[in-house]
Image (spheres, rainbow, N blue to C red):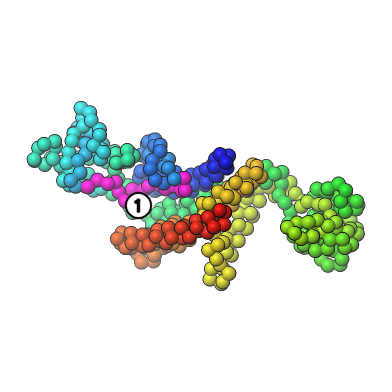
Amino acid sequence: MIENILAFLLVFGIIVVVHEFGHFYFAKRAGILVREFAIGFGPKLFHHRKGETTYTIRMLPVGGYVRMAGYEEEADLRPGMAVRLTLDDKEKVEKIDIQGTEESVDSVPVEVTSFDLENQMFLTGRVGTDTEERTFEVNRDALLVEKDGTILQVAPKDRQFQSASLLQRMMTNFAGPLNNFILAILAFTLLAFVQGGVRSDEAKFGDIEENTPAARADVETGDKVLAIDGENVDSWNEMVMVIQDNPGQELTFKIEDEKGNIYEENMVPMSAEQNGKTLGRIGITAFMDDSLSAKLTYGFTNTFFIISRIFALLASFFTGGFSVDMLGGPVAIYATTEAVVQAGTIGLISWLGFLSVNLGIMNLLPIPALDGGKLLLNIIEGVRGKPISQEKEGYITLIGALFLVILMLIVTWNDIQTFF
């Protein structure tokens, strides 16, 4: 149980960190102030501030986010709030404590009446019991302590998301899914090295089991089947289907060895029970291509193969055959992780790559609140020559978020029905 939970958190955590790091890296390159790099949602369990960014781990391990200035809702500072200001030796504000708990010689209790932390960089309020207002100049890199204790940096206008160029904003939005695809490529490449090669799609003999039809025949590892009973065989799967469909029936195999010699062998597949069905087998495994080129290219080919299968599934939404039952949520992911753990390191690496591709594609869907929806808004801005108003964008994002919540509830309910 604990092993399964740890494996789930490890795999999901790696995928989320890599995804969010993509947004983080390109935002920093664009000069956007990244206030928080969060793993998980909900109440904060841990936080550490380094440079301009606060790194947090939150209670619900179901995702994460990068909080960019001007992109998400700003800190909860409002007129009428009682805060404490920490001043530097020039009487400029270097920290605003919304909690009001910062008490020191340089700490000043203030009831906020107005402020501008984007352009003019000031805060006005009544100090202590004074009735007269006082205006404080705020440093461009002043800190802001939120109600939950998270320490953020104030963001002048030129450090906010919308101040970056359109191309920079598009790259920042696309970088998360891009990183997921890169992670998948690396994971599948590592998998190829760990398992000693890549399973060939050709109809080649791999390992040969003892006391089986293949062992009794004069065949060797690496030999390639060209035809069975006069019918051409073009792939491993095609060969397996013919063998499985003919238990106890003599088959004539036309074979080419690694030297190019062609010969024939007769074999009678032995019967084996599988899921209540009687299938034929001759005692071979798929051939493993252990060449360096096969290992290095496997990460790319398998990632693109999974992407194509996901797009085929999404296309069925329009062509028919799609069902919400095809989707899986956190419960399904955990249940599959439990099975994958039994497969050991190879299973976990494969699962990591598969999930990373899925997360990348899912985030590119043109749904508001997802990276794909944000990219769509960027494209619309490029066509119109001006961005959609923040108010309209907020409404669009809210609709997208509600859609995702409803979809997640449906998927989770399906998971519960399936696994419990």
Q: Is 59 rendered above or below residue 89?
A: below
Would you say 95 lies left or right of 135 here?
right
Would you say 272 lies left or right of 156 here?
right
**Measured from the top left, where is residue 112 in percent x and y?**
18, 43
Q: Who's the residue at 51% across and 51% down the image? A: 330
Q: Nearer the viewer, residue 289 or 248?
A: 248
Q: Nearer the viewer, residue 38 or 134?
A: 38
Q: Is 348 rendered above or below residue 419?
A: above
Q: Amino acid at mark 1?
A: Tyr
Q: Who's the residue at 58% across and 39% down the image? A: 3
The quadrant in which residue 404 appears is: bottom left
68 in magenta: yes
Would you say 268 lies left or right of 177 here?
right
Q: Which residue is mark 1?
A: 71
Classify mark 1: residues with Cα within 10 Å, few (<14), some (14-19) or many (20+): some
8 in magenta: no
User: Furthest-bottom residue in view?
Assistant: 319
The quadrant in which residue 241 appears is: bottom right
Q: Nearer the viewer, residue 219 or 210?
A: 210
Residue extent of the magenta highlight: 61-78
